[in-house]
Each structure stands twice: as structure tokens, then as C-alpha cells.
Amino acid sequence: MSTPKITARNVSVSYGAKQAIHDISIDVGMDHVIAFIGPSGCGKSTFLRTLNRMNDTIPSARVSGDVRLDGQDIYAAEMDVVQLRARVGMVFQKPNPFPKSVYENVAYGPRIHGLASSRGELDAIVERSLTRAGLWNEVKDRLSESGTSLSGGQQQRLCIARAIAVDPEVILMDEPCSALDPIATARIEELIHDLRGRYAIAIVTHNMQQAARVSQRTAFFHLGTLVEYGKTSDIFTNPKEERTKDYITGRYG
Amino acid sequence: MNGVVLLILTIGLGIIAWAATRMHALSFRRRSGTRASSLPHHHGWYVALWTTVPPLVFLAIWTATSPALVTDMVLKAPAAAQLPPTGFERGAILSEARALAAGQAHGAFHALSRSLTPAYDAAQTRIDWIATAIVLLLALAGGAYAYLQVRPEFSARTRIERVVLGLLLSASLIAIFTTAGIVASLLYEAGRFFSVVPITDFLFGTHWSPQSIDPRDPGASLGAVPLFWGTFFIGAIIAMAVAIPFGLMSAVYLTQYAAPRARRIMKPVLEVLAGVPTVVYGYFAALTVAPTVRQFAVAIGIDWASSESALAAGLVMGVMIIPFVSSMADDSLAAVPSSMRDGSLAMGATPSETITRVMLPAALPGVVGGVLLAVSRAIGETMIVVMAASGVATLTANPFASTTTVTRQIVDLLTGEAEFDSPKTLAAFALGLTLFIITLLLNIVALNVVKRYRETYE
């Protein structure tokens, strides 16, 4: 495995008095997709949100441990959250396009970060992002329509296009298909395949088949701890831990 | 026996009916052992209502009609033959006799009224006995009818429910009818005004001086344009220039930045501002703000600045409106799904970028609706402008000059000595009607804007 993009060591998060995750150490690399699986409330989403400091938006959340992006401590005082989130993008559980046009949704990030110096450049970024998100052909004639008028699956791909428009290095996906039907889900999964290699991708999912289909590494969380972490093929065919085995065979969760 | 006694009697009968029926229902409930659809007190209420409502309806009608019946009977008395056939004196004698009979007067101007007093006494006594008999009859008949229906399987509960429905319906109808009545009286009085003054003179005339009306052409000095301009200038421009930025920014702070603790303290404090009586704002404007504004104006070289400037009234009105704008903006910002905010923050936007580029545009229709409602409140506001604005109508856009408003003029026109059918007083109703139409339209537009916005999220 090449040098990991993100290294997380001994990460713990608590909300007030309640500890949500405990002592998690995981690497996210460019050459693979990593899936975080586990029953509800196991802390997998909380961990994902530590990787771009989205837990900062929750006043009671306290994060300890060490998270590095390309060796740089993202919780250091001199770390600029604006820069960090431009490099580590995020796609949420429920599609959340802004109530703006399709074009403006994708152009939002580039405008904020000043990535385009002319309208032509911005057009090019929007087209490239939508193309990579596999949405360009469906929306190229509807760029001025509201992003919220698209179907659920299209909205989620729009959110992915929005995330990749700022040219991030890492994309975090928090159960991106849980609000979608199977066909839309399949399209997102294909898209994850296409995006692999260009971005480091971490995906939280409830769906174990999905984890098996899209990821090369899998981390199994349970009750706020990391139970097992390794190659997806190993986790699903030959788990070392009894709890992992029970979970993936549907004994609980 | 007078109306109050009958009223107490009826209510007493109702209480007895309630208690008796309840006892009865309790006893058959215990005996039958089956589950009745109604509780004993439902039966009690059912019979009590049947006992009291018919007599109460009768009493309401009776109170209105019985004086006329008494007078009719008195006029048939022999002494009444000496009454003058018509006119003022006849009425005076009759009311004097009535007062003597009721024991409210001790002496009489007319000898005749003294001789009519026994007739009044007799008539009143007869009428009272008739009323008492009818009340008792209605109460007993209604009570008996209802009591006979009370059986274990009788569903008094659903009937009570229907009564409750009727009560609630009539309560809301009363509000609607009152509104309709107000509109009708406004329309009627304004109609009288417009039969004297052409509507175009009123709506488009630029000269307003009701103190010096030329009887041959009243319309020439009743042009309302300066008033509506003044209202708009103070209420919609100056006040909103204060209320929109401060209200919006405080809403943004409270919803997006404030720690839960700060919000818990600051939000109620801000709402206290909405509870300050407008009179208090009024003297704050007149005694504190207006002199300060004038001093400021003089200091920067405008020595003719009025001490009743539009600016002073508008500024204070703006402060008064802040809580309205802020709480509407607060609501609509809170209605924007938090996933929008997270989405924007996750793109690397700062909180202020998130607010100006995502949250406010998403909440804009709600904010606009709130602002329109605030405007309609501001232009209907009276007390501040009565105390702080001028009474002289000038058509000016200078905030240091004195201007007047529609509400201020209505107060001026209707207070003081004036006959109630001169164009001058009737103009108040025309002003009121126009103001009412404007605020009504503003409210309709505002509510529509807010409604359309909700449809996009749900």
C-alpha cells in the first residue's frame, strides 16, 4: 500500500459526557475505497466527520487523538478549516442540494475558493464536475433549473459533482445511498468505481453488500470501537473476530 | 321580578338539572353494569343545557322587546288618553312616568306622568309575571324533554360534542362578523364622504389642509397624497431602514452564531421590545429622540430642522418593529434544513458565507413576508406618530422636515369639536378605508409569499 492520504491515530470523540468513539486508528489511501460498516450508533459516521472537522459544528463535541492529512495535523491551531474542507469533500446521507440552480450548486465551491477567474473557466469546471459525476448528459439542458427539482438519485450525484468541483483530494461519503432506490444506488456505486484512483474515498454504509461491492478496505465498528480493519475480501470471507463474523452473517445489527 | 333575577333562577334550575340527572345516570350505571357510551356528567350537561338554553334565548329576546310591550299596555290605560298625540313632550312624559315607576326619580315636571305611574307599575308587574311564567315553563319543558331521553344507551356524549362544536364555530364567526361590520361601517361613512368629495381629488390631490375647507370645493384641500407619502416615508422607508438590518442581523446571530445559553437569554429580551406599549415608544420619540435628531441636524448645519421630524418618528418606529422582523426571520432561518448549512460548511465555506449565500437566499421568501407584515404594522401605527410626528402635511423627502401620517390625521380629524357629517370628519373614514385596503393587500401578499416558500420544502 502506498503512502496513506489520511492517517488517524487513537481518535476519540465525546459529545458532552457521552463518549461516541474510542481510540480509533485507520488509514485512508489514494489507491482504494475504504468502507466503514457497523450497526447504528457504532460511531462510524462520527469518525468520518472527524476527518474534515465537521464535528466542529456540534458545540458539545470534543475530539482527541491525531488526524493527519499528508502528514499535516488537521487539528493543529494553524490549520485553516476552509482549506481543509476544500481538500476533504463530503457527501451526506440525504441529498442536500442548495435551493439554487444546478449550475450554481456546482459553481458554489469554485466561487467560494476563487478557483475560476472567468466565466468560461467556471463553465468548464461545472461541465467537468458534472461529467465526472455522471450527470452531465441528464442535466446539460437544465442547468438553470433548481437543483431541488431533480430526482433523488440525480440530486445525490449533483452533490457529488458539487464536492468534486473544488478538486478535493479526499471524498467522504456518509451513507450516500440510504435515501435512494436500488437503481439510483447502482448508479452511485458505479460512480464510486469511476472516481477511485483520482480521489481517496471513504464511505459509511449500512449495506454490507454495498461495502463488498464498492470497497477494497473495510473497517468494522461496534459500540464506538474499531473491531476489525483489513482487506474487504478478507473481512467478508475470513473475518478474524467473532463479532465481525456475527455481524456480516446477519446475526445482529 | 327583573331580568337578573330570572337569569339567576334559570342558572339555578340548570344546576339542579345537572345534579339530578347525574345522580340518576350514576344509579342506572351502577345497576346495569354495562358500559354506557356516556359518562354521568355528560347526561347532566345534556339536561342542564336543555333546561337553561331555551329560557336564556327567550330572556335575550324579551329584554329587547318588553319595554315596548309595557309602553303599549300603558297607552291603553285610561290616563293615557290625555297625552299629547305626538312630539317631544309625549316621550318626555312617558319616560318620566317610567322612571317614577322604577323608583329612579322622586319628583315630576308633568302632573300627567304622576297619574301614569300606576299604569306603568301595573304593566311592568304583569309583564314580569308573564316572563317568569314563560321562563319556568321553558326550563321545565326543556328539562323534562331531555331528562326523559336519558337512558344507559343514550349517547349524550356525542350531543355535547356537537354543542362544543357549535360554541367554537360561533366564537370564530363572531370575529368574522365583527370584521365585516367594521368594513361595512367604514364603507358606508367613506361612501358619504365620496358623495361630497370626488374620489380623484382625494386620491391624487397634493394639498391637505382640513382646517381651511372651501365649502364650494372641499376636494381642493382634501388631497391625501401628502399623508400617504408621509406614512410611506416614515413607516416603510425610515422605519424599515432601521428594522430590516437590525432585525435580520439579530436573527442571524441568534440562529447561527449564538450559543444555546446566549440564545435562551437574548431571544426573550428581544421579544420584550415587542411588548413595550406604543405610548411609551411615543414619548421616547417625542421627548428623547426628536430633540436629539434636531440637535444633530443643527450641528451639521441644517438650522431649520423640525423638532417633529420624520426621522425621529421613523427611527423609533423602526426600533419598535425590530422584534417582528427578527422573529419572522428567525423562524424562516430555523426552517431551512440544517443539511443545507452542513453542506455549505463541508464545501469549506465560512459561517458568514454560508449565511449570505445559502441560508438567507433559502429563507428569503419568509424574510420578505415578515418584512411586509412589519411594514403593514408600521403604517398602521398611531401612537408614535401622534406624539412625535407633525400635524402639518408637507410633501417632502427630507427626513429632518416635519411630515404627517394617515393615522395621525385621523386622530386629529376625529378629536376636538366637529359635527359628524362635515367633509372634514368624514375624510377620516375615507383615510381609514384606504389605509385598511393597503394593509389588507400587504398582508395578503406577505402571507402568499410565505406560503409559496413553505411549499418548496415540504
Image: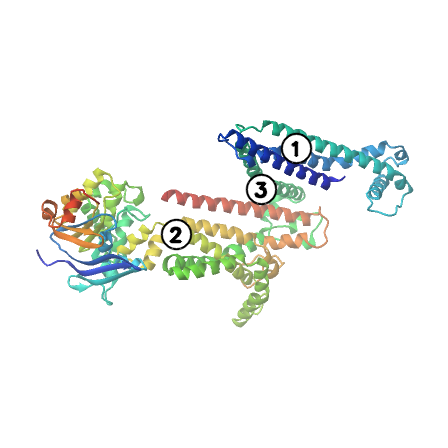
* Residue at the extreme bottom: B299
Residue bearing the label numbered 2: B334
Give the spatial CA distance, label 2 vs label 3: 32 Å
Residue bearing the label numbered 1: B54
> Residue B179, how many percent across, how many down?
59, 42
- The chain containing the residue under callout 3 comes to B
Q: Amino acid at mark 3?
A: Ala
Dot 1 falls on a residue whose secondary structure is helix
Q: Residue at x 61, y 55 (%)?
A: B408
Left or right, B196 with reference to A87: right
Left or right, B237 with reference to B132: left
**Image depth: mark 1 or mark 2 in front:** 1
**Is residue A5 shown above or below A246?**
below
Residue bearing the label numbered 3: B175
- The chain containing the residue under callout 2 comes to B
- The chain containing the residue under callout 1 comes to B
Please rate how many residues cluster around mark 2, counting C-alpha atoms within 10 Å: few if below 14, some from 14 to 19, many from 20: some
> Residue A155, how many percent across, how many down?
26, 44
**Image depth: mark 3 or mark 1 in front:** 1
Comparing B437 with A51, the one in front is A51
